[in-house]
Image (tube, helix red, strand yellow):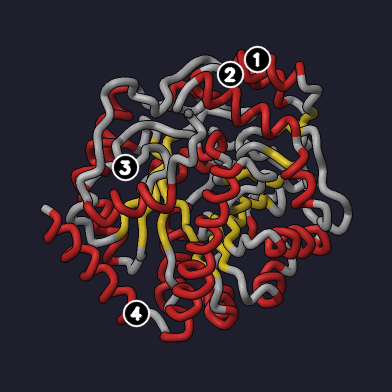
Amino acid sequence: MALKDWTSLAKISCRIVRQTPVRLLWTFAWNFGWRNLWNMRAFEKRSAKGKKFFPAFVMISVTESCNLRCSGCWVSAGGRKTMSREQLDGIISSCKNEGSYFFGILGGEPLMYKGLIDIFRKHSDCYFQLFTNGTLLTDDIAMQLREVGNVTPLVSIEGLKDESDRRRGANEVYERSLRGIRACRKAGLIFGVAASICKGNFDELVSREHIERVAREGAAYLWYYIYRPVGANPNPEEALSKEQIRTLRQFLVDERCTAPVVLIDTYWDDKGVAMCPGATGMSHHIGPSGAIEFCPPLQMACEYINEKGSDTADLFKKSQLMADLRVMTAEQSRGCILMENPDRLARFLEEHGATDTTSRQTVLDEYHRMVHVPGHDMDNEAIPEKSAPYRWLKKNYFFGFGAYG
């Protein structure tokens, strides 16, 4: 089995090398690979020695604005909160001072944020993962991303033609996203495809056919999420059943050994035991309002960065809300507290005086109304990784850090 694992990874690597300019490969290897390696090691050492906290990497939602209206999305429909360029620049600079050079850039739709590519260009020593629906990813934008060289677009595909239109509240979304993917390939970018798995798209996307389809389009990786019924229009009936979550986990473990793309999840460690990235402290989030948040769908906070973003590191180190949330979520479950115990989360946020960070100002009521749905913690039914490369990566660079004792 191990030989197949490494053979599959070698084939993926060769394909990426053939379709990607050398300059982009070098930037990926240095900015993301080497810098991130040292950053993760530094994070582990801080955690082990009990030093002042700072996450391994930060996710940043730059705007609430979006050109789609997806069901189950936590972003305020029609919201206009947008981070200033000065704040965004300051956040990145503050994080770099802590040794962190990798950032997830989200929205809304981040390609609606003016000046974003200029920020990428200014921080050429960093690497950015751009979470996008792909509909605004034109040939011109893709070529600009090629020119800056330090961005990997992650294009969200929420189903094939009919399901994409249904989930995303617009027409021809699948075709428009595919055009964005093909623009990335034409520009020679290292890019991925994401999928938030719900009942409506399970059969279409949890399949070898979809994996091979993504590989044919030139993607380097395919990232599977589990649908979280949050926001003003949560649609909890679309949440996966416990059996479907187990099926998804088994599918990932089995297909990872021979898949023609790298299959990614952030829900289970190398032994198949569930975990929450926020509980480990590996990653936290900054919203469009400048709020220091636990994770993107948890939109309440006690701390907000200043106008220059220069106090970002200090806020992460001093935030009692973040520290207490890491402890509480780890004690409650190894899964997702938003899905499994939203009542406890709502009470906790009220007790800490956290405020709504969104335009709609209804988040706390939404949490009180949420129904409990299965999370990814499968209790004693853990399914260990089979793929030797992925098992090694998860064990050494992605999970643990003592969050669960």
Q: Quadrant of residue 136?
A: bottom right
Instruction: Identify the residue position indicated by label 2 in the image.
Output: 342
Q: Residue furthest bottom?
A: 22
Who is closer to the viewer here, 265 or 106?
265
Q: Dot 1 corresponds to which residue?
A: 368
In the image, which is nearer the foreground, mark 3 or mark 1? 3
Q: In what element is the residue under mark 1? A: helix
In 3D space, how far apart are the residues under numbered discs 2 and 4 (Cα atoms)?
45 Å
Q: Which residue is mark 3?
A: 270
Q: What secondary structure is found at the residue carrying circle 3?
A: loop
Judge depth for marks 1 and 2 and give the one in front. Answer: 2
- Residue type at the position of mark 4: Gln
Depth check: 260 or 8 in front? 8
- Which circle, 2 or 4, is nearer the viewer? 2
Disc 1 crowd, CA 10 A, few/some/many (<14, 14-19, 20+): some
Dot 4: element = helix
Q: Which numbered mark, 3 or 4, is in the foreground of this view? A: 3
User: Residue 306, position in %: x, y?
Assistant: 87, 51
**63 w.r.t. 270: above or below:** below
What is the x, y in percent for residue 186? 42, 78
Q: Callout 2, which amino acid?
A: Pro
The answer to which quarter of the image holds residue 247 is top left
Q: Earlier in the sequence, mark 3 or mark 4?
A: 4
- Of the image marks 1 and 2, the number of the one nearer the N terminus: 2
Q: Position of residue 153 (x, y in %)?
A: 50, 64
Q: Amino acid at mark 3?
A: Asp
Going by the image, does 381 lie left or right of 346?
left
At label 1, the amino acid type is His
